[in-house]
Image (spheres, helix red, strand yellow):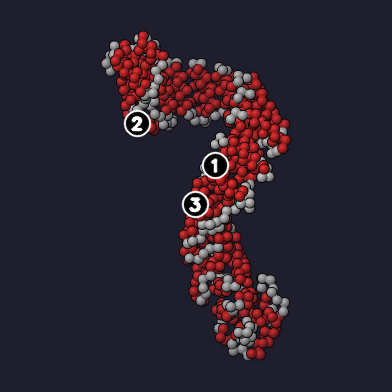
Amino acid sequence: MKSLLGFRKIPSGLRLRCLRNNKPFCSQSRFPQESENPSQEQRLVCGSTSEENPVTSKVSLLAAKPEQKDDASVIDVLLNRRNNPEAALRFYNWARPWRGSFEDGDVFWVLIHILVTSPETYGRASDLLIRYVSTSNPTPMASVLVSNLVDSAKLFGFEVNSRAFNYLLNAYSKDRQTDCAVDIVNQMLELGVIPFVPYVNRTLSALVQRNSLTEAKELYSRMVAIGVDGDNGTTQLLMRASLREEKPAEALEVFSRAIERGAEPDSLLYSLAVQACCKTLNLAMANSLLREMKEKKLCVPSQETYTSVILASVKQGNMEDAIRLKDEMVSDGISMNVVAATSLITGHCKNNDLGSALDLFYKMEKEGPSPNSVTFSVLIERFSKNGEMEKALEFYKKMESLGLTPSVFHVHTIIQGWLKGQKHEEALKLFDESFETGLANVFICNTILSWLCKQGKIDEATELLGKMESRGIGPNVVSYNNVMLAHCRKKNMDLARTVFSNMLEKGLKPNNYTYSILIDGCFKNHDEQNALEVVNQMTSSNIEVNGVVYQTIINGLCKVGQTSKARELLANMIEEKRFCAVGLVPDEIMYTVIVNGLSKKGQFVKVVKMFEEMKKNNVTPNVLIYNAVIAGHYREGNLDEAFRLHDEMLDKGILPDGATFDILVSGKVGKFQPIRAASL
């Protein structure tokens, strides 16, 4: 291929003839034409300016054959037009169809460097980079393009223009190539190139949207390190990231830093700061920010902002402030939404001020906003807890009449209220209705199961288990535990074991409470052997024995007269430090059970030893244990020690009861009648 110098040997007449016969070059450009005057177009393309002779080597290049146009020749022409970016762009667009794509070589980057030198061609540079990034296949690596920019600037004598890097960042962020955009920002920061804040904000926004919150914060920190703080948009993004991470204190720090550097917060920034204050329950600061917003008339508090503070005030139990804020919001011409109204109703209900709650509810019905399911839930729950079941049912039916479908919560709340109020028929009637309509779930069924079992209606409970399975409401472990407990209370251990076997057949895994029910049932039937077999079965099933089970075993051993075994088990657990492993701390309840058993046997010496052991294990004896020890000393004739222990109780803040005074005054020891026991 001939060099550019070869074109200069073409006779001047031929050069001019070629120029006159050539079409306007901009007609082949992808950009809008800027001139319909051929002579003017020729002057622009050929560089016919006051500094440049129109008959130059550039004309020779235009007359040459396509295969003669190599990259070096094109770059030479572009460089000669570096002070005329529009002419350089027209030449580039003319040469592209002849030469093919220049975007894989230095030609493209030389053009970008030229275009970013003039405000008139900034947009052209940005558009070219957007097209390049979005149409390249495969997508070019960000690091490669940055290297191309840097290398071409050094090679062809351009100053590094931050605008070129920023337009490249803009191209990646617009094409939603967030990782590449992050790479561009990081490389710009390493090169000391200042990124444009709007482009960085778009990248930070993309990171926040995809929950890459840590990465977004790290990127911002690197920006701050080179003195780029960002604008209000940047602050908003960082605050949103912190709030999404449930770090409201961090969001307030971001807000404070923005104020310190002189930022003028807008309504959105104020709103985010108020939300953060409400999450930390810093209502003093939230109200202060609200006043600030109102003083700056351009920053009017929004409905969302007011609602945040109202909710936080109700949560803190400050109904006076909540009502004041509601009135202030309405006086500002901002309507109250259903969230704020429901929150106020909740606050009134917590204060047991049902009159105010109902007044607000009826006002909502008349003036809006319309009550929703949550609003009804608050009132139904409060009426049910107060035992006002007729009122609860009234609102339940009102809800249906308004086209709001009652939820499982509503049905469950009313059923529990009926059962608590001993209105069993009404509860069962509502349960049957919900069961038939398919609204009842396993939780509602378990509530009825529990009630039937407590009433001893085991046949009905067993029948309900079958109905649940037929309706596709799979009974869970709680369901079976209820029925097992009922059988154990009736001392029908065979039936309890049958229910246990059925549960295993259904693929349900028993929990600690399941085994506690069986163990307790066996002990109550004085069946120590089967109780311990259940314990063995539990451990062989790789189920860790927890505190509830250990307490059940110790209590059961004492009930069947095996106090020594219970005491031994407790001692072994303490020695092996198994309490920590099972989440149990030996407390006065466990010791009371053992002391009670020892006292019944008259084993006073062992009672005293357990008493000392409790103190050693930092367990404070309760009044029952003190009474047992005082009674033992009294029976042994150790009156001084008995009264000393009485004083010790008072010093520890343990109030003596009637039994204590009976023992000390009259020698009555009630159920504790210890006698001298053999040595331990």
From this view, report whether residue 44 is shown above or below residue 215.
below
Q: Give amino acid for label 2.
A: Lys
Which of the 4 image quarters holds residue 164?
bottom right
Residue drawn at (62%, 81%) of the image: 47
Q: Nearer the viewer, residue 454 or 122?
A: 122
Q: Which residue is mark 2?
A: 577
Q: Point out the image quarter for the N terminus.
A: bottom right
Q: Which mark is residue 91?
A: none
Q: Which mark is residue 283?
A: 1
Q: Give amino acid for label 1.
A: Leu
Q: Nearer the viewer, mark 3 or mark 2?
A: 3
User: Gap between marks 3 and 1, in whole Å?
Assistant: 28 Å
Q: Nearer the viewer, residue 667 or 573?
A: 667
Residue drawn at (55%, 17%) of the image: 456
Where residue 642 appears, as percent x and y from the top left, is 32, 16
Where residue 640 appears, as percent x and y from the top left, is 29, 15
Circle 1 crowding by C-alpha within 10 Å: few under 14, some 14–19, many from 20: some
Where residue 619 appears, as percent x and y from the top left, is 36, 26
Q: Nearer the viewer, mark 2 or mark 1?
A: 1
Label 3 secondary element: helix
Where residue 128 appears, as percent x and y from the top left, is 61, 68
Which of the 4 image quarters holds residue 133?
bottom right
Q: Tell me which label, 3 or 2, sits earlier in the chain.
A: 3
Farthest-out residue, left: 679
User: Gap between marks 3 and 2, in whole Å?
Assistant: 41 Å
Q: Which residue is mark 3?
A: 214
Q: Tell me which label, 3 or 1, sits earlier in the chain.
A: 3
Q: Give amino acid for label 3.
A: Thr
Residue 540 seen in this snapshot:
no
User: Mark 3 near mark 2, Cβ–Cβ under 8 Å?
Assistant: no
User: Mark 3 near mark 1, Cβ–Cβ under 8 Å?
Assistant: no
